[in-house]
């Protein structure tokens, strides 16, 4: 009996296992999907919920926007991050009150980008996970704003509801049974309308009505009315100026040409973070003769060659020192020799290939204005002058080499495709130099630490 019953027990156990298997699969799948959810970032503040929400309205522009690169902002997924394009982020902020009277702020960010697959049918927008940098930056901005905002500090204090006496209807001078009047504040017109509040009011009246209304006023009342109108006009002009400044910030710089590199350090040999497109705008933090320090996104910073940017109003795109260097560069150097020979270096793009070698010397060896900037300007003029010959001999020459024969001289090398892109306008001057070879690099490095290239 035992032997006959054993197979039956085994079949029952196997049937129970198969019945429970779907449940196990669902539990495992739920665990995996839960781990793929974006983890919200949260922070507690002592200010009230209303004060925090008011501060968040000022930070609204920082809650969404374009990401120049995904590295440093998103977690790697099924595909390399460099295969994605057109990345954007959208942060959702939730504010809730805490038992102590403060508030809890929770930030959850979605990052989307276009995945470019080798098979076009597999390309498309995909949702990526944020690594927390955007959330932390937004919470840091909120912390700084709450710490410096007097209104946010005062609004976080709690007061008893019965401590403030509400004015009675009689005190307001309003009869019982009538509703309190609703006062609507005039809205300022946009700066391009060219009209103030008073001019809009006068336009609504006919000339005769306007004259009668002014003549009906007593002299004292007319003076008070004029003072009020003058004050309103001044306030309207102030509001219009604020709107104008908000619509057109004065500290933005714009990229002139696509392919302009944004680098990590102010150096021709600095690491390229990404290539900016034409008309891209960045907030300018600082600038010097050669470089402009810009904010990329959040806490990310970068440097852009000054001549590659349209500077804000009142600041020249081309510094005066650079203009003088271009004017005198032709008077500082002269070409002493031209020849065709193998590339005299170990740079991979030109290694073992024939190039045109141009030897340059200073006209006066002790000339103190023939520094790095003057050399770059003269090198640019030689590339422009010799481009036609290089293009005609593209089967024979792979590039051009400029050798400055002096104590503080050096060598600049460029490939023919790089010069072609520069001449076609797809590369800015800064992008041209970032694709050239310098030996030694510090000789031509106008600003910043020396580096190899």
Image (cartoon, grey):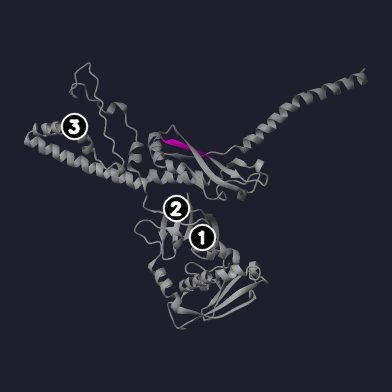
1 or 3: tag closer to the N-terminus? 3
Q: Is residue 361 left or right of residue 26?
A: left
**Is there CB contact under 8 Å for labels 2 and 3?**
no
Label 1 packing within 10 angstroms: few (<14), some (14-19), many (20+): few
1 or 2: tag closer to the N-terminus? 2
**Is there CB contact under 8 Å for labels 1 and 3?**
no
Q: Position of residue 251 (x, y in %)?
A: 38, 53
Who's the residue at 44% across and 60% down the image?
Answer: 292
Q: Secondary structure at mark 3?
A: loop
Quadrant for the N terminus in the image: top right
Q: Secondary structure at mark 1?
A: loop
Q: Which mark is residue 282?
A: 2
Q: Which residues are magenta?
A: 102-109
Inter-mark Cα distance, 1 to 3: 58 Å
Label 3 packing within 10 angstroms: few (<14), some (14-19), many (20+): few
Of the residues tagged 1 and 2, which is closer to the observer? 1
Q: Position of residue 406 (x, y in %)?
A: 52, 81
- Residue of label 3: 205
């Amino acid at each position: 009996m035992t032997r006959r019953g054993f197979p039956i027990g085994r079949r029952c156990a196997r049937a129970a296992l198969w019945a429970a298997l779907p449940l196990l699969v669902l539990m495992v799948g739920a665990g995996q999907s839960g781990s793929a959810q974006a983890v919200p970032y949260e922070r507690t503040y002592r200010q009230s919920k209303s004060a925090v929400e008011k501060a968040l309205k000022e930070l609204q522009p920082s809650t969404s926007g374009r990401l120049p690169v995904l590295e440093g902002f998103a977690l790697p997924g099924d595909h390399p991050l460099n295969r994605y394009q057109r990345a954007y982020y959208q942060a959702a902020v939730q504010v809730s009150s805490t038992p102590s009277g403060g508030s809890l702020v929770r930030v959850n960010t979605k990052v989307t980008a276009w995945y470019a697959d080798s098979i076009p049918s597999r390309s498309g927008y995909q949702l990526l996970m944020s690594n927390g940098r955007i959330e932390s930056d937004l919470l840091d901005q909120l912390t700084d704003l709450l710490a410096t905002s007097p209104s946010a500090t005062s609004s976080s204090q709690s007061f008893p509801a019965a401590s403030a006496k509400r004015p009675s209807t009689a005190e307001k001078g309003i009869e019982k049974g009538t509703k309190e009047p609703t006062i609507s504040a005039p809205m300022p017109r946009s700066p391009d309308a060219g009209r103030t509040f008073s001019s809009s009011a006068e336009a609504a009246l006919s000339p005769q009505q306007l004259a009668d209304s002014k003549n009906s006023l007593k002299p004292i009342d007319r003076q008070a009315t004029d003072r009020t109108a003058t004050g309103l006009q001044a306030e309207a002009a102030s509001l219009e100026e604020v709107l104008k400044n908000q619509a057109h910030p004065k500290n933005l710089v714009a990229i002139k040409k696509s392919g302009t590199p944004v680098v990590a350090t102010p150096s021709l040999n600095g690491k390229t973070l990404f290539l900016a497109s034409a008309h891209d705008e960045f907030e300018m933090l600082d600038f010097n003769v050669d470089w402009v320090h810009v904010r990329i996104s959040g806490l990310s910073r970068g440097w852009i060659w000054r001549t590659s940017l349209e500077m804000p109003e009142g600041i020249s795109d081309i510094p005066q020192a650079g203009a003088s260097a271009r004017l005198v560069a032709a008077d500082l150097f002269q070409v002493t020799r031209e020849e065709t020979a193998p590339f005299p270096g170990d740079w991979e793009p030109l290694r073992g290939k024939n190039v045109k070698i141009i030897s340059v010397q200073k006209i006066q060896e002790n000339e103190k204005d023939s520094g790095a900037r003057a050399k770059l300007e003269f090198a640019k003029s030689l590339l422009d002058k010799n481009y036609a010959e290089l293009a005609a001999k593209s089967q024979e020459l792979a590039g051009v080499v400029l050798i400055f024969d002096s104590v503080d001289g050096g060598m600049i090398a460029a490939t023919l495709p790089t010069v072609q892109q520069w001449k076609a306008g797809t590369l800015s001057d800064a992008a041209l130099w970032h694709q050239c070879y310098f030996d030694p690099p510090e000789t031509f490095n106008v600003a910043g630490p020396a580096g190899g290239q």
